[in-house]
Amino acid sequence: MDQNTETFVKGLRSFNNTDVNAVGGKNASLGEMLASLSDRGVRVPDGFATTADAYQTFLQANGLVDKIEQALDAIDSEGVERVGAKIRRLFTRAEWPPALRSAIVDAYQKLADTAGRAVSVAVRSSATAEDLPDASFAGQQDTYLNVQGTEQLLSACKKCYASLFTDRAISYREEKQFEHMQVSLSVGVQRMVHADKGASGVMFTLDTETGFRDVVMINGAWGLGETVVGGEVNPDTFLVFKPKLNDTDAVPIIERRLGDKKIKAVYSKEKGKQIKNVHVAKKDQQRFTLEDDEVIQLSRWAAIIEEHYEQPMDIEWARDGDSGELFILQARPETVQSQQDLSTITQYRLHESGQALVSGIAIGQKAASGRVQVLDSPDQHEKFKDGDLLVAEMTDPDWGPLMKRASGIITDKGGRTAHAAIVSRELGIPAVVGCGDAVKRLQHTTSATIDCSSGEKGMVYAGELKIETDTIAVDDAPRTQTEIMVNLASPEGAFRWSALPTDGVGLARMEFIINNAIQAHPLALLHPDKISNKEQRKQIRTLIDGWQSGEAYFVRTLAEGIARIAASQYPQPTIVRLSDFKSNEYAQLLGGADFELPEENPMLGFRGAARYCSERYREAFALECKAIKRAREHIGMDTIIIMIPFCRTPEEVDEVLAEMAKHGLVRGEKGLKIYLMAEVPANVLLASSFAARCDGFSIGSNDLTQLMLGISRDSEVLNPYFDEMNPAVMKAIKMLIQEAHAAGIKIGICGQGPSDNPEFAEFLVREGIDSISLNPDTVMQTAEAIAMLEQRN
């Protein structure tokens, strides 16, 4: 290749991030990874790229510059569609300059020689203004897959050039005020990864909903990645905790969610059609696209790429179905959550309830209401008014102008990385995606409210409900001598509070995970044949579909839920309370009625420590122990502390400790600490005996008040007398604090009282309590009150 053609085509490895003007962000990034990260194990398909000079030479050789500018001058009079079509025809009719043609053909032949055989390639567009943090042009130009032979390659390269003037690309540049002729296009040519026979997807080096930086989020589906990026499938989702990636003893997958993956994209042999969607076999729908070791491998690569670029990244990956090898196809800066101001937290909540219409995946952690507008295509834009809720089967870039006018988005298809999800985050509006039947069910709905504020499940309610917001300024938080911890229940909502300046999780409620994520009674999962209700038996079969067993479903789901909560505050401790359902609450779980006996007073009945060692529940308690052990040792969340609730006697503590030890949870081994909920008067009167058997107390002020005063906390009649600042309750708490300190163990409180009553919090501080665990939305104001009190003292 002579010196002239060297300016037209070079191997990808010869480029780096300083070459954006020469080959665009996409190809510069590929070159950077090939040259700098291959030695660290990151596998990127090799190839070559044409330069911006090659594009300009193509324009000049065919006299296209003046013709394109003349066409663009007529946009106002002729419209984008007509002008775009005219410009694209100019490219397809143009001829390759001999030197440029020769350079491309020679580079392709060299790639084939290296492989030792004829190769199929992916031909990708890379605009010189693409993938910049302040103006992402991603998805505006075209890609051609499974291209074989020089003539197909030259045709695909020419089509890439023409795609610089698609209707979407022209409109996008107009909106971003980029000069059309100042943007050039580089074509990247890479060895093809046969994901059509394997799997592919996208991953981000942060949580796409909250901006939490300590996770890698991976989406995956069978076949080519177009179905994931386009939102045509609900993909598998994996969350991996980055700080534990280099721990060889840990598999830090803190969430895995099975997507239905009903279709996959494969290559098409039909003329004029690159790919087609085909049905996925039921057995493949019910299994994950990635094994654990592959999830960890991709996550390690993602962390390496993020470290190299020194910013959060948006990455495409694929697995070759022939070789089984994983590859990174693209990496670009993440441009939404990484740009957010994390110094404040805005909390949304509905002030009233309404009729639930549909549900799906929550995007945006916000709420919005408006007129419902169900559309079949963006061509129906005349029906749409600013502030409407957009309801569609799915969206793509053609929907962009309508989405910008919407107050919220609802789709039947798609996952967290679908087009609708990505764009709604960028626009700062809530979306509920993957609903399945929203278009059908909302067809005759006039107005509705989207609620994405309560975790991973997004809800759509009838009517325009009242929405309240609170803004919390994180940077203004004072530091206190008393440890300030946070009460958390929802794994999905935990990351949103990670920026709070706390000393860990003072109470992680296991029963919330069981009720919301697992949904079934643990004994019903172990013995589905004993469930008398046929419909509930069917529901449980659906829940565990694709799992090895009901036990595996319970243990993994609970372990990952606990681990996700612990990850939100790592490396601070997370105190996980063992299940504290009452028998009537257990009975309400799927299949629960067949395993629970009715009690006249469940609040004082078969709950807490007594349940764990009973023959009636021991088998289910084993699952809880296995889940905690998995979260601590397999996933790697060694900051988890176990808390035993409702212990009536010291001997009962001994029984529970012995039962836990049978399942590998031994106090003191592998750093395991055991705390007790101090909520029964016996815990106060026999505090020294209880203290000898544990590493700390956490006061459950609700139950302690109930039992000290003989008032049911659920009694509406006696509610005015339920007072945690009653002298008897306060005296009991004072005694507990003194006894704990005398025994040399820590004592905190995790009841509702300090969150609701600043005076109660001040009392606790004066008595020298070690920690106060608060509801997330009260952390800031209560911490400020505590800091002022500590200063006065």
Image (cartoon, rainbow, N blue to C red):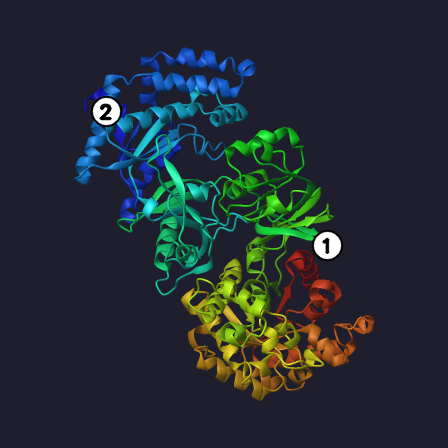
Residue positioned 61% across, 87% down in the render: 649
Q: Position of residue 793 (x, y in %)?
A: 70, 66
Q: Secondary structure at mark 2?
A: helix
Query: Is 287 situated above or below 638?
Result: above
Seen from the viewer's position, the closer of residues 227 and 50 is 227
Q: Position of residue 709 (x, y in %)?
A: 77, 79
Residue positioned 68% across, 81% down in the render: 599
Real-space Cα separation, disc 2 to disc 1, in angstroms: 66 Å
Residue 501 lies left or right of residue 217; in this view the side is right
Residue 199 lies left or right of residue 534; in this view the side is left
Q: Check the image and name the residue furthest to the bottom.
A: 651
Q: Amino acid at mark 2?
A: Ala
Res 35 quadrant in image? top left
Residue 769 lies left or right of residue 352; in this view the side is left
* Residue named by callout 2: 103
Seen from the viewer's position, the closer of residues 50 and 88 is 88
Residue 82 in view: yes
Specify the label residue 353 is tagged with.
1
Quadrant occupied by the N terminus: top left
- Frontmost of labels 2 and 1 is 1
Residue positioned 34% across, 45% down in the render: 195
Query: Is 357 situated above or below 538?
Result: above
Q: Amino acid at mark 1?
A: Ser
